[in-house]
Image (cartoon, rainbow, N blue to C red):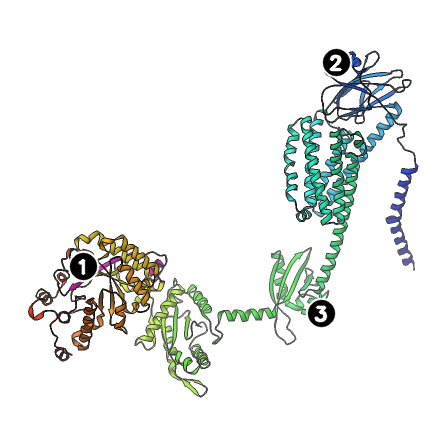
Amino acid sequence: MNERIVTRHERLLLWASTWLLPILIGLLSLWALVAWDAYYASSGSTMLPVRVVSADNLTPGEARKLLESEAPSANFNTKLSERPFWFSFANHDGAEPAVFEFTSRHARTITCWDGDNLAKLGEAVEFGTAGAVVKGKAGFALYSEAGASHFLCRASFVGPARQSVLQWSQPDFVQSSQEFHRNAGLLDGGILLLAAFVLVTAIVLKKGSYVLFAAWLIVNLRMGALSAGWDMQWLGRAIPSEWLPQMRLLTVALYYMLTVTLFSSLFRDDLEQVGYRPLLRFAQLTCIPLLALSVILPYPDFLPLIWISTGLSSTVLVFFLVRILKFRPSPVAWWYSASIGVALFASLYEVLSAALGLKGLLMALNSVTAALASSLLAALAIAEQVRQEQRRREEMQAELAHTYEAIPIGLFTLDLNGNFVSVNPAILDMLGERTNAGSNWRQHFGPAGWIALHDMVHQKKDGELDLDGPTGEAGELRRFHVKATLARGKIEGSLQDITQQERANAELRFIASNDRLTKVLNRHGIEKALEQAIAESSDRHPVALAYLDLDRFKLINDLYGHTAGDEVLRQVTARVNSMLSGNHHIGRVGADQFVIVLPDTSISLATWICRGIVERLGSEPYQIGDKAFQVRGSIGLLELEREAEIRDALSTADRACHEAKSGNHSGLVVLEKNASALHERQVERKLVERLSTGMAPEGLFLEMQPIMSLKAPLDSLNFEVLLRMRDPDGSVIPASRVINAAEHSGRTGVVDRWVLQTLLDWLTENGSRLPNTQFVCMNLSGASLNDERFAQDAAAMLQRHPAVASRLCIEITESVALRDLENTRRFIDKVRGQGARVALDDFGAGYTSFSYLKDLPADVLKIDGSFIVNMNRHPANVAIVEAIVSLAMNLGMKTIAEWAEDHATVRTLVDIGVDYVQGFAIARSQSPEALLAASSAASFIADPRLAEYVRTISSVGDAPGAPIDMMKYRELH
């Protein structure tokens, strides 16, 4: 019962202090303002009429006489003039001592005389006073003794001065001055306190816009002080008089700049939505120039400029305030708008009043009242913003609490001993109901799990790790992902059950690296295994690579379907795996191709293993249902070097496998490190890399094989250019390697361009030394024939060498020409149009249909060498060649027989009527220099009998075209 009474008493006391007492204080303050007497009570002042004239170089007497003709007025406006002003006024009540207050805060100097006897009463400047003239409130004051009736004064002003004269009794003026300074102190203290509050709020909330607002309040205070006339002091300390003029200009410019900047900062998001951004940019762009001009320009020149800028910018900012309140209203926006709006309106109002000379406006509203009102409204705006932020913070905390309870990821807090301090429901679902405050991490993840977590949070700010946790309901091992950090002496973290994710990832990893059908590695997986094996290899730990291809496996798929073929592949991989050890890997890289990586295996052991695999695969049939299939395999085995590249190694092993399939190698071809095939592959790879850049490889050169005319053998020197390549060590590389490399890289056009350009350049340079050369043959690859760009380049090269183009004879293989008859015809027409001739090479080697010859305007038929070599042993070949010769003659074509290797063959070709012969019987390929030194192709013949026969080839018994005794050839056969 006593505790309940105490609690009620505390609540009553809190309510009275929080609500009742502030309300009573507020009501009492209102009552004091209405009913109580003013502490600084006075009977007030009297405004005296004044006569005024502006003139230079007048004596007091001249000025008094001139003023007598002027009409009196309540006050006068200097209109920014800095000329001296003379004015006179009369004592309203001369019986008592009085004080005459000169109200203008813009007065710089003032001197007063007795209006009757022109005795000097006193004078004052901004730096000090003398005599009866003293500083009073915002301006100056003149103390007079009883009996003085008329006064004459001369004053100078700076700025928009409006001068009036107020008469006070001396006690009342003292009271009024005290009230003036008290009000100034209250305004200074109140706004400074508010600015300090805003600054502290800015530091607490870390909001830069509040710092800007605090600075704006300080400058707003100085503007109020400037308007009220007490800007000559700051924090109770007098500002040096020589600083005042420039400080006033700087204050105005700073107020302008901070107002524009504060407006842009507070309403940044709103301004993006209301449009008209160029208007705001105009106001922003004027800030820095005005600030600089306030330091440079004198007071009279700067004031009109700041009036114009303030007027325009105030209008622009008021326009934006209206649009913000219209399109994006909010309580904070209303309070801020009101605060800045009052200041802007007062500034604009005071500028207009000063510029237009409306004293009444200045009396009603100025920067003092604006500073008070805008500061109060700013305090309300900040209070509203703090209230909204507090409400948002509470909403976020509630949402965070809800998220903490509902999130499916477990959240926990541990002390430094591993005890659970707090957990969310998801933790309970993962680890069980026993996971409550007081239970320990080790109970669920064991001592090793706690050590791993403890070390992680102490080594890293934010760490992650995976742990094996308690088993599931079915007894399966579960996996958890932990994120944790050390914060405020506790371990804060999250826990996620990733068991299913780990299983899915493991399955994806298996799929990414393994073949779905056979479950062995796929191409990606076996290449990774090969890469790792090569990286770990050494002389003591060699690596071998085997490429396995099943023989005629496609027949199984075609005859019995893919289901049977798939089952055979499964059984094949099972048999291969039975021959491999644990560190060996097999991968499927094609339909029926496999790669086997043999790490830490010598080539001799690998050979034994691969031979066993070949025997195991073909040793017994593969039983699929009621069917049995016999499948054999071939293997290319390669001993790898440490610097071997995967692509090259696979390609070389593949070639070895093809060799094993095609040759008599018992299904296995082994290439050791020093095998010539490996060296050839390396050379070819370098060629491919060179050709891939679009450039011909270094070391290419041409040789020429003579082609002898069988009509005039001693009067012609024709030949075929042959491509050769010289290795850096000086040895000659077979041309077949260059051609193979070009075909593999798809760059045969690069080689053909080089040959054609080199040949044309050589013929152009040496054509005059070859008087007996009617044609020079050049073989063209099929890829270049079907390359439209090459055709254009070839025609262009021929066009650049018109003098030798007519000697060129381009050989096109018959089988290539028949692939695309229309394209071949276009190419022939294009090169023949430049004067070159065309020969059909290897004629008769394919499935020849003579009908196509009428559609191809070729000049020469080059009879395939298979019909020529040893033709005298095969009468059928003689008949075929005779038919080809007869066909060519009827079509107007010349014939060339290649591969002629002996005297007898040449004699037969003469008898048949062949036009030209080429082969070792005439000459092997020669250097260009040897060709230039010869007079005819016959001069290269080394066989004396053939040489003699050539010299007597036109004798009667051996005349070309004589009837051929076919029985003779049958007997020879």
Tell me which numbered mark, 2 or 3, is placed earlier along the sequence: 2
The residue lying toward the viewer, choosing from 937 and 68, is 68
Query: Residue 421 at what x, y percent from top left?
Result: 72, 62
Label 3 neighbour load within 10 Å: few <14, some 14-19, many 20+? few
What amino acid is labelled 3 in the image?
Arg
For label 3, the residue is 434
Which range is magenta?
682-711
First in residue order: circle 1 vs circle 2 = 2
- Closer-to-camera residue (84/409): 84
Within-10-Å neighbours for mark 1: few <14, some 14–19, many 20+: some
Does the image show residue 81?
yes
Per the image, label 3 sits on a secondary structure element best described as: loop
Give the percent coordinates (x, y) of residue 28: 90, 41
Does the CB distance between marks 1 and 2 fall below 8 Å?
A: no
| Residue placed furthest toward the left | 956
Q: Magenta includes 706?
A: yes
Q: Secondary structure at mark 1?
A: loop
Q: What is the distance, in whole Å, between disc 2 and disc 3 at their CAs?
A: 105 Å
Q: Where is mark 1, residue-wise?
A: 774
**Relative vertical location of residue 328 with respect to residue 344 in this rendering, above or below:** below
Q: Is residue 584 above or below residue 205?
A: below
Using the rendered view, name the quadrant where residue 697 is placed: bottom left
Residue 244: percent from the left, percent from the top? 72, 27
The span from disc 1 to disc 2 (Cα, nearest Å) is 126 Å
Q: Please tell me whether mark 2 or mark 3 is closer to you in this view.
A: 2
Name the kind of residue labelled 2 in the image: Leu
Q: Is residue 253 magenta?
A: no
Tally the numbered discs: 3
The quarter in which the C terminus is drawn is bottom left
Judging by the rendered image, the residue that carries numbered circle 2 is 58
735 shown above or below 97:
below
Q: Quadrant of the N terminus?
A: bottom right
